[in-house]
Amino acid sequence: MEVFTSVKSLRIFLDQQLSHQKTIGLIPTMGALHEGHISLIDASVKENDITVCSIFVNPVQFNNPEDLLKYPRTLEADCQMLEKAGCDAVFAPSVEEMYPEPPLLTMNFGALENVMEGASRPGHFNGVGIVVSRLFNIARPHHAYFGQKDLQQVSVIKRLITDLAFDLKLVVCPTVRETDGLAMSSRNRRLNDEERNTAPYIYQILSAAKEELLRGRDIWEVTAAAQGRFAAIGSFTLDYLEVVDIKTLQPIQELGPEGSNAICVATFLGPVRLIDNLIF
Ligand code: PAF
């Protein structure tokens, strides 16, 4: 596995691969890798000749300077995991390499970003759109892999690909969970022992709410009851809990056909902000 820190050296490597008609899979990440990321690498290794993983903590998508500062950075351990998983190339640029000049462009995804993560983290999807576009232009992948845990990010990137005519296929992989149901996330390593023991309630409450909805209980009643359960546990500070249409991401009053609904949550547990969702 080769590690590239400059755009130029990665491009030279990928030009060679493309000239031999090799297919390229790209997994954009911010590092602090876990089994969820490795499931994306596995999918890419199966489907492409060359798998590239980018590791870049993108300052443009953070609206909270403390969150950016505290974001775990574990490049050496990440590279070991990637090599073991059969990744061919890592792209780990510095901020100056990725942004020789601060971007002037701003991206606005309209109604797709006026809810949930976009509403709580103004400018977040502008930063995601900019960095993902740069990565697509640098790596020119045939396939790009993202996790369903970031449901809204997936919708925004789908739209980015359509609007800017990126010639690639987006592959969305299921959320990978710990045995107790907690969705894997780089942020989980910032939880202390007590918070880590409490964190699986997120999945439990979401799953119970989903079952109630499937039994036909009113959406408003179910979300209010789930919010009450989070409040009763005490250590959670809920940001949002919404039942949405997975295409528009807008809250719904009645369930749509199977597979078109999602229950989404973002909550602070101590200082750590966690998100999760279930599609049904
Ligand atoms: O999901 C992430 O880790 C980031 O938002 C991404 C897609 C790598 C862009 O920085």
Image: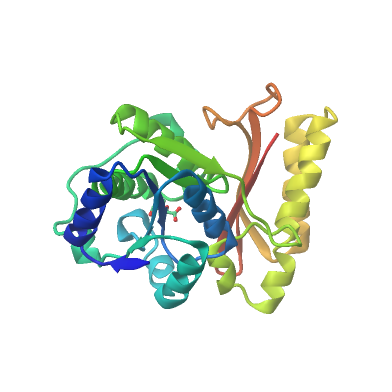
Query: Can residue 166 be seen in the rendering of this structure?
Result: yes
- Measured as percent of width and height from the top left, residue 4 is found at 27, 65
Check the image and report above or below for 82 versus 248.
Answer: below
Check the image and report above or below for 68 versus 107.
Answer: below
* Direction from residue 176 to residue 219 in the image, left or right: right
Q: Quadrant of the C terminus?
A: top right
Colouring style: rainbow
- Measured as percent of width and height from the top left, residue 60 is found at 30, 56
Residue toward you, 133 or 54: 54
Residue toward you, 228 or 20: 20
* Direction from residue 196 to residue 95 in the image, left or right: left
- Measured as percent of width and height from the top left, residue 184 is found at 61, 60
Query: Can residue 72 be seen in the rendering of this structure?
Result: no
- Measured as percent of width and height from the top left, residue 117 is found at 49, 46
Residue toward you, 237 or 109: 109
The residue positioned 40% from the left and 48% from the top of the image is 49
Check the image and report above or below for 5 versus 278.
Answer: below
Residue toward you, 268 or 112: 112
* Direction from residue 14 to residue 229 in the image, left or right: right
Count of labels in the image: 0
Q: Quadrant of the N terminus?
A: bottom left
Q: Quadrant of residue 113?
A: top left
The extreme right residue here reads 215
The extreme left residue here reads 101
Q: Quadrant of residue 52?
A: bottom left
The residue positioned 47% from the left and 35% from the top of the image is 155
